[in-house]
Image (tube, rainbow, N blue to C red):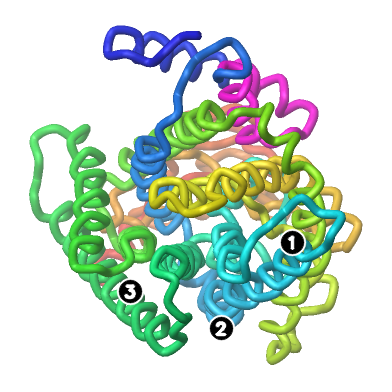
Amino acid sequence: MFTFTTENIFLLGSFLVLISILISKTGYRFGIPTLLLFLFTGMAFGSDGLGLHFDSPRQAQLVGMVALSVILFTGGMDTKFRDIKPIVGPGVLLATVGVVLTTAFTGAFIYGLSRWSASDLELSLMVSMLLAATMSSTDSASVFNLLRTQQIGLKHRLRPMLELESGSNDPMAYMLTIALVEVVKSGTDFSFGLLLGELGKQFLLGGVMGYVAGRCAVWLVNRINLPNASLYPVLLLSVVFITFTLTDLIHGNGYLAVYLAGLVVGNSRLSYRREMETFLDGMTWLLQIVLFLTLGLLVNPSELLDVSFAAMAIGVFMILAGRPLSVFLCLLPFRNIPRRGKVFLSWVGLRGAVPIIFATYPLIHHIEGATVIFNIVFFITLVSLILQGSTITMMARALHLDEPLAKPESEFGVEIPEELGPQLHELTLTEDMLANGNRLSQMNIPQGTLVMMVKRGKSIIVPNGQLELEKGDILLYISEDMRGK
């Protein structure tokens, strides 16, 4: 059995990341979620596989906190206010009330299952609720990853709704988990009023800190004028970790804070945006790989067989009853969301890294039955990623909710400073536009306008006045007629 040491951790870690990426390329062709493959890779190299020994829930939790901070911030940056504004109501309800309802329904089922004589599961009511709370939120890493890698669009603004829910429901699940851990540890009666007060404080402080940190980050990036553009992404990354840590120190919710900070930053005018987005996308992928590898190494696959019956029953209940009930109840006031849209939202209740990280809290606090809780959560995560993660596209098509992906904002992939943004335009040529001649010099181009590039198919052409244009060509031009307006 191999053990992680200072001498081999970089070699083994780098090797695991490389193997995961190579495996994910093959799995992607067959529609297998890449994050699931990272998880399997960790399990294959773990103590029950090739013998890498890693058994520290606390270190896994630390890795999870670092990874989720960046994943949530990046998810916030990619979410545009114009997309989520029409669905803020249902999104927030799903992220708050939906989490509570999922915990209540699933906790009651787990407690009933544990009372069944044919079941080996023996959990008290509060421990049953604790187990349900760890799994009550949809996983942001899994949802963001799958929605971005599945080449499909969704009708009725379902995509931004899912992203808003998954990015903002972790705080509620975290608070429920921590509160129930304290209840189980102390053996005191459950205080609903105390829990509401703590939730309110966490959300208020997390919201304020996230907004303030986002505004400060925008001001700093646009004003600091660093000599090296490569330092801007590093600066933003440091702001992410400072935001999470300071919010946690004042007993606010750090996960909510970094997500809101990302929303503010992503929807503001920002210098060097392309460099920062590229850096954060790469960092997000790296941290997702490290996170799922770490969690895969932490579990002992042989122990999953002991909880397979109970875990499968709980997983099926969550997928077919617990999640759908909470979704339909939360969305009752929103008649503009069709029934098939609600069915799809119910199906994409993915479990992933977040529930497994939350399941480490009972382990760290030595809750009775903590190992059973962790193994059940891990088993259900595997079931969710395999069953739900692999069928998102199929389900969307079956419910007639799929649509073509929106075109990228720029066909050319060029970056213009945001203060010049209104001057940059793209134009797709039609037959009528070429009626007076098909050369650039023959077109009626206003004075002060410069055609910079022409895209024809996959080719980019630098034009001159004698270039013969064709129907479907896309012109990239910059005009100074917007200056000062």
What residue does disc 3 label? 202
Q: Nearer the viewer, residue 461 or 202?
A: 202
What residue does disc 1 label? 114
From the top left corner, tell me how far across and down residue 281 is, in percent.
43, 39
Label 1: how many residues lie within 10 Å, few (<14), some (14-19) or many (20+)?
some
What residue does disc 2 label? 89
Q: CA distance from mark 1 to mark 2?
A: 36 Å
From the top left corner, tell me how far across and down residue 50 is, in percent.
59, 10
Residue 395 falls inside the magenta stretch: no
Residue at the spot 13% in from the left edge and 55% down from the top edge: 220
Q: Earlier in the sequence, mark 1 or mark 3?
A: 1
Vertical relation: 41 (above or below) 66: above
Query: Image quadrant of residue 247?
Result: bottom left
- Please state, as top left, top right, bottom left or bottom right, where the C terminus lies in the image: bottom left
Q: CA distance from mark 3 to mark 2?
A: 20 Å
Could you tell me if residue 465 is visible in this image?
A: no
Residue flagged by tag 2: what amino acid is it? Gly
Determine the secondary structure under disc 1. helix
